[in-house]
Image (cartoon, grey):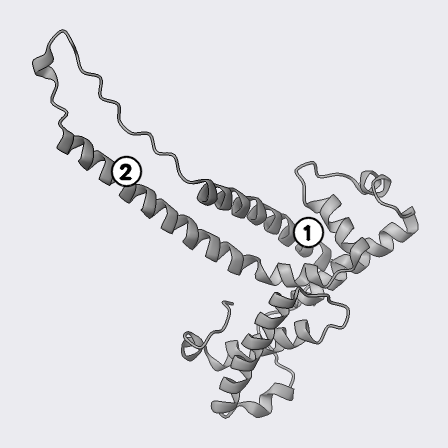
Amino acid sequence: MSVVTQKNVKEISDRQLIERYRKLQQYTSNRKATFHPEVYSEMMFELEIVKQNIMKRGKGEVLSQQLVLTGLEPPKKDEYEKIVIQKLREYYRQTKLYQNLREEYEKGIELLFPKVTPSYANRSAVTTTNSEFQSRTEQAVIQQEERKEYILDELRKLREEMKDMDLALFSLDELERMFIEKKHFNNRNPTDTEVIADMPVERTKYYEIRKSAYLIIAESLRLL
């Protein structure tokens, strides 16, 4: 679900608003989480908007009730890890795409201007005038600006899609985050044995970290 703002809140249904409220409550009340101050401030601001609008709609009493989503069965304990791993892979793909788009936007877009090579054997064949060159230049500038707008729009969409996982990862401690980065945020797809060798913990402790990291992410994403 998209971030709730003063502009879009009227378009959001009561049920979606309550779901968002519960998720934000879960994030902000997690004592183990260490959010960046700006992220935490944004969440608290959004939480206040959601809360105020739920009260305005006369639905305040449901905030303390258990929300049951019919037709959406939570995964079993032995299945949630697979779902978390899939979401981590998708998140990593999104981060790489975000990085590539950001780099393209920041360093500018190089457009190849059409080259005009006149034939000196027949000077009458030279038809490219200053006005034509100016027209091509203006068209290139327009294309560049359109591409920039497209990139900005894609960056905003990606940032929104990644937000829930961002918050989930903020909930991890140092070793749990280290495990996730070494295990999932690369293109090598390393085995557990390889990751253990690259972490400052023994095998038994590693599997405890592995289990807790997946569980925390699953709970943060409301998979359980």
Q: Quadrant of residue 138?
A: top left
The answer to which quarter of the image holds residue 68 is: bottom right
Q: Is residue 209 visible?
A: yes
Amino acid under disc 2: Ala
Residue at figure coordinates x 68%, y 45% from the top left: 185
Q: 118 or 16: nearer the eye?
A: 118
Q: Element at badge 1?
A: helix
> Looking at the picture, how far across and down is residue 48, in whole percent?
56, 81
Vertical position of residue 144 compared to residue 75: above or below: above
Dot 2 falls on a residue whose secondary structure is helix
Location of residue 51 by image quarter: bottom right
Q: Residue at x 83, y 40 (%)?
A: 198
How many neighbours does mark 2 have within 10 angstroms: few (below 14), some (14-19), or many (20 or more)?
Answer: some
Q: Viewer-proximal residue, 121 or 147?
A: 121
In the visual, does 154 lie left or right of 209?
A: left
Kindly identify the amino acid type of the residue bearing the numbered disc 1.
Answer: Ile
Q: Position of residue 126 (x, y in %)?
A: 12, 18
Q: Which residue is mark 1?
A: 85
Can residue 76 be seen here? The reply is: no
Total tally of numbered discs in the picture: 2
Say left or right for 195 vs 205.
left
Q: Which residue is mark 2?
A: 140
Q: Within 10 angstroms of label 1, few (less than 14), some, or many (20 or more) residues?
A: some
Disc 1 vs disc 2: Cβ atoms closer than 8 Å?
no
Query: Hey, which residue is sitting farthest top in the picture?
Result: 121
Measuring from the top left, give residue 184's x and y in whole percent. Answer: 70, 46
Is residue 182 shown above or below 166?
Answer: above
